Amino acid sequence: MISEKTVLILGAGASCDYGFPIGNSLICSIIANINRYLSNGTFSPASRPIFDNLANTIIRNDPANIDKFLRDHCDSFGEMTRIMIAATILDRESTYETITSEISPLGTKDNSKADRFGFNWLKFVINSLTEKCSRPEDINQNKLSIITFNYDMSLEYYLLNNLLSNSKFKNEASNYIKNLDIIHLYGSLRGASYDLDNLLQEYGAYDKFNFDDKDSCIVNRARELYRRDYQTGRMASLIWID
């Protein structure tokens, strides 16, 4: 159990173990996805030149990271960039499920997948949260808060999925994760008011993106990204702890 007030501050590397690209890899994935969608007809004729221009601008600008590109090109490419970030992250959500589903009990199907599955930092967080909890409800006494700069929800998904698969804590899992203070500083794909009860069913379930419908899933998810005003007051209240 984490008995002292503790705040974890997470950067891009925190999601790397769960299949999400970081830094230059994210930029390359966005460009590759734009080219893939251009070739397979995903973009409408009206959208094609816009996204083609976005890819060429990213290449010419060669930003250190995609957030820097968003800051510098917010007025001209802000919406399209957020949409491609959302598409790239949603496309990777199924990676964790693929890794776990392809590991046999003896780890014989693919050793590289088994090795990747075996090394992730969140298992140690779970261990700290559940250790010395004599009763299942004791997990709610943990004094942990998390601030993340990441848009994806692999953090919530892993914690919830892990606790639900734990015979001792499964009945407390949903309640604990809902009340766990997790702040996505720049917003998340599903927004602050998202009902976590839907996460296990929806995670990795996006097969086709509609980039032209303003009410489509991908566009709505993109609207939640890079919100500069996102809960900074709550973040300050967590960091400055007596």
Image (cartoon, rainbow, N blue to C red):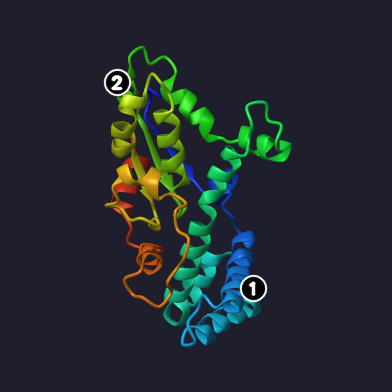
Contact between marks 2 and 1 (CB within 8 A): the answer is: no
Q: Classify 29 as above or below 95.
A: below
Disc 2 to disc 1, C-alpha distance: 50 Å
Element under disc 1: loop
Residue 137, which numbered label?
Answer: 2
Q: Amino acid at mark 2?
A: Glu
Position of 234 with respect to 83 (left or right) is: left
Query: Quick one: 149 or 176, which is closer to the camera?
Result: 176
Q: Which residue is mark 1?
A: 62
Q: Is residue 56 above or below residue 11?
A: below
Front residue of this view, candidates 3 and 28 = 28
Q: Quadrant of residue 216?
A: bottom left
Which residue is painted at 31% across and 26% down in the image? 172
Q: Position of residue 24 (x, y in %)?
A: 64, 62
Q: Nearer the viewer, mark 2 or mark 1?
A: 2
The three-letter code of the residue at mark 1 reads Asp
Image quadrant in which the N terminus is located: top left
| SS at mark 2 in the image | helix
Q: What residue do we see at 63% from left, 35% from top?
A: 103
Query: Which of the labelled discs sits on residue 19, or is there none?
Result: none
Question: Which residue is pictured at 43% across the width and 35% down the height?
Answer: 161
> On the picture, is 133 further left or further right than 67?
left
